[in-house]
Image: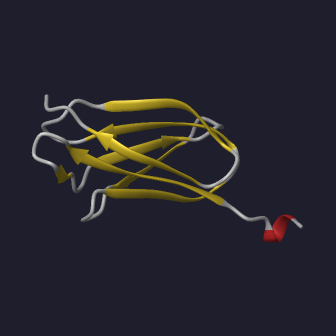
Amino acid sequence: YYLNRPHLFIAGDVWDPVDNEVIEGAEIALTMPNGETRKTETDDFGDFYFRHIDEGTYDIGIKAEGFKPVERKGIELSESLNLGDFPLERA
């Protein structure tokens, strides 16, 4: 049973609402329920994915050069989730 346990994902995308452009290379940090942090960057389309994660409560932090950081805390994950758009405000 545990060997075939399905895993979930969290996804989203980051963009600049002023220029109406995606933000490539934004740093995304996912804090796991056990306190560990996983990091990734947005791709050429401004998208990010964290795959192979389990149910639990997660926090996300987003940083991009020239923009104010954004955090979303207390994301309850019981099924795979696309968080949608994260518009960043210029610093």
| Place of residue 61 in the rendered image (x, y in percent of width and height, measured from the top left) | 39, 36
- 83 horizontally vs 42: left or right: right
Residue toward you, 77 or 28? 77
Seen as rendered, the residue at the extreme bottom is 4
Colouring chosen for the image of the structure: secondary structure
43 w.r.t. 79: above or below: below
Residue toward you, 35 or 20? 20
For the point 48% across and 43% down, which residue is it? 30
For the point 59% across and 41% down, which residue is it? 32
The C terminus sits in image quarter: top left
- 62 horizontally vs 15: left or right: right
5 w.r.t. 14: above or below: below
- 67 horizontally vs 28: left or right: left
Residue toward you, 42 or 78? 78
Seen as rendered, the residue at the extreme right is 1
For the point 45% across and 58% down, which residue is it? 49
For the point 28% across and 31% down, which residue is it? 69
| Place of residue 34 in the rendered image (x, y in percent of width and height, measured from the top left) | 65, 37
| Place of residue 64 in the rendered image (x, y in percent of width and height, measured from the top left) | 22, 42
Residue toward you, 87 or 24? 87
The N terminus sits in image quarter: bottom right
Give the total number of marks visible in the rendering. 0
| Place of residue 14 in the rendered image (x, y in percent of width and height, measured from the top left) | 30, 48
